[in-house]
């Protein structure tokens, strides 16, 4: 069964939380840095998606305000300018 974009993001969020990284920004979702989502999906799942695919999936995922699969009780928007940032509140 093929891994979904949502599942990749949830696993990436769990990995960041396990590493005590509770704040993410739009460049983490769309960037190509070592700890960013795009290389994570490619390295751990062999899946390559473009930045807009991940951004779209992230918007849908955080829409409800919580992500139970990653034990995130609330996704708090910190700022929108100059770059969007979110704090992940966990149980």
Image (cartoon, helix red, strand yellow):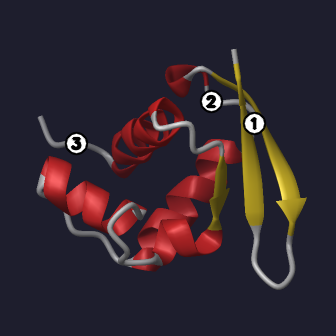
Assign a secondary structure to mark 1. Answer: loop
Label whose residue precedes the other's in the sequence (3 or 1): 3
| Cα gap from disc 3 to disc 1, whole angstroms | 22 Å
Seen at 75% across and 63% down, the residue is 85
Seen at 46% across and 30% down, the residue is 18
Q: Position of residue 10 (x, y in %)?
A: 45, 38
Q: Give the quarter of the figure containing the C terminus.
A: top right
Instruction: Return the mark for residue 64.
Output: 1
Dot 3 alpha-carbon crowd within 10 angstroms: few under 14, some 14 to 19, many 20 or more:
few
Label whose residue precedes the other's in the sequence (2 or 3): 3
Seen at 75% across and 46% down, the residue is 87
Assign a secondary structure to mark 2. Answer: loop
Q: Position of residue 65 (x, y in %)?
A: 78, 36
Q: Nearer the viewer, mark 2 or mark 3?
A: 2
| Cα gap from disc 1 to disc 2, whole angstroms | 8 Å
| Cα gap from disc 2 to disc 3, whole angstroms | 18 Å
Dot 1 alpha-carbon crowd within 10 angstroms: few under 14, some 14 to 19, many 20 or more:
few
Instruction: Return the mark for residue 3.
Output: 3
Seen at 46% across and 38% down, the residue is 19
Q: Position of residue 28 (x, y in %)?
A: 52, 67
Instruction: Return the mark for residue 67.
Output: 2
Dot 2 alpha-carbon crowd within 10 angstroms: few under 14, some 14 to 19, many 20 or more:
some
Residue 81 sits above or below residue 41 on the image: below
Q: Are marks 1 and 2 in contact (CB under 8 Å)?
A: yes
Assign a secondary structure to mark 3. Answer: loop
């Amino acid at each position: 069964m093929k891994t979904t974009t949502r599942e990749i993001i949830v696993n990436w969020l769990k990995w960041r939380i396990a590493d005590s990284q509770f704040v993410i920004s739009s460049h983490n979702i769309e960037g190509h840095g070592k700890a960013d989502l795009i290389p994570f999906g490619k390295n751990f799942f062999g899946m390559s998606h473009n930045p807009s695919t991940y951004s779209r999936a992230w918007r849908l995922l955080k829409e409800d305000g919580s992500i139970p699969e990653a034990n995130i009780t609330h996704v708090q928007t910190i700022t929108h300018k100059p770059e969007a940032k979110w704090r992940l509140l966990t149980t």
